[in-house]
Amino acid sequence: MCQNATKTAASLMAAIEPTIKNLLTATNLITTPDGVAAISAYDAALAALQNWQSGTAAQEVLELIGDFQTLFNKLPIPPEYQMLGNIVLAGIETVIGVVTANSPAPAAPEGVEAHAEAQAMHQAAVAADTTAKVQSLVPSFKRSIFHSPESQYNKAWNAEVDASGLDTSLKVA
């Protein structure tokens, strides 16, 4: 398991917050009932994530993150901002992957002996699945083991703002 899974996931989740707010502000959705609901769901998911401990079940955290995803996906994001929305969703998928990979592996089916490497196999499977989901949302994203997830997220966000020719006030530090 990742030694700092809680910190890694919470740091990435916190890095996503200003991009959500920038996106919702730029699209005039921040004060709409749906925008307010999405921000509230995000805040609840972040709070639960910050209280989660690596190696423990994360059902509540994952449910709250899922609630945010559902609300975010319902927002009427204009086409010119859709790729930024995909970056938000890719960041959320990464958080889900970190949490899931660092939760206990599913139990072996009844009558099947548990494999000694079950946790490692679980983590590898989750990592592969998460990578595929992120790549489908943001095909240009290149993962780096040399940079923090929040740094990679911010770099992808800022590169998309530049590439899209959108207002540079959408960029994050």
Image: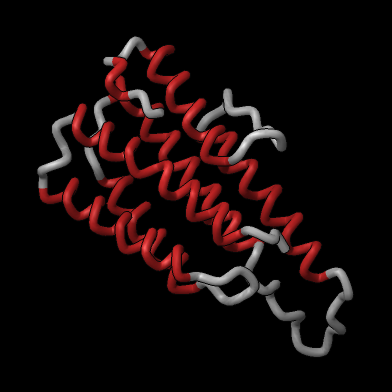
**Residue displayed at 28% across by 58% down:** 41
The residue sitting at the bottom extreme is 111
> In the image, is 25 to the left or to the right of 8?
left
For the N terminus, the image quarter is bottom right
**Residue displayed at 57% across by 76% down:** 57
Name the image colouring: secondary structure
Across and down, in percent, residue 70 comes to: 33, 54
**Residue displayed at 47% across by 65% down:** 62
> In the image, is 40 to the left or to the right of 171?
left
Image mark count: 0
> In the image, is 52 to the left or to the right of 34?
right
For the C terminus, the image quarter is top left
Query: Toward which corner of the image does residue 16 lie, by quadrant?
Result: top left
Up/down of 86 relative to 65, above or below? above
**Residue displayed at 49% across by 46% down:** 12
Across and down, in percent, residue 118 comes to: 81, 70
Q: Nearer the viewer, residue 107 or 45?
A: 45
The residue sitting at the left extreme is 32
Across and down, in percent, residue 82 comes to: 35, 28
Q: Nearer the viewer, residue 168 or 4?
A: 4
Across and down, in percent, residue 54 comes to: 61, 68
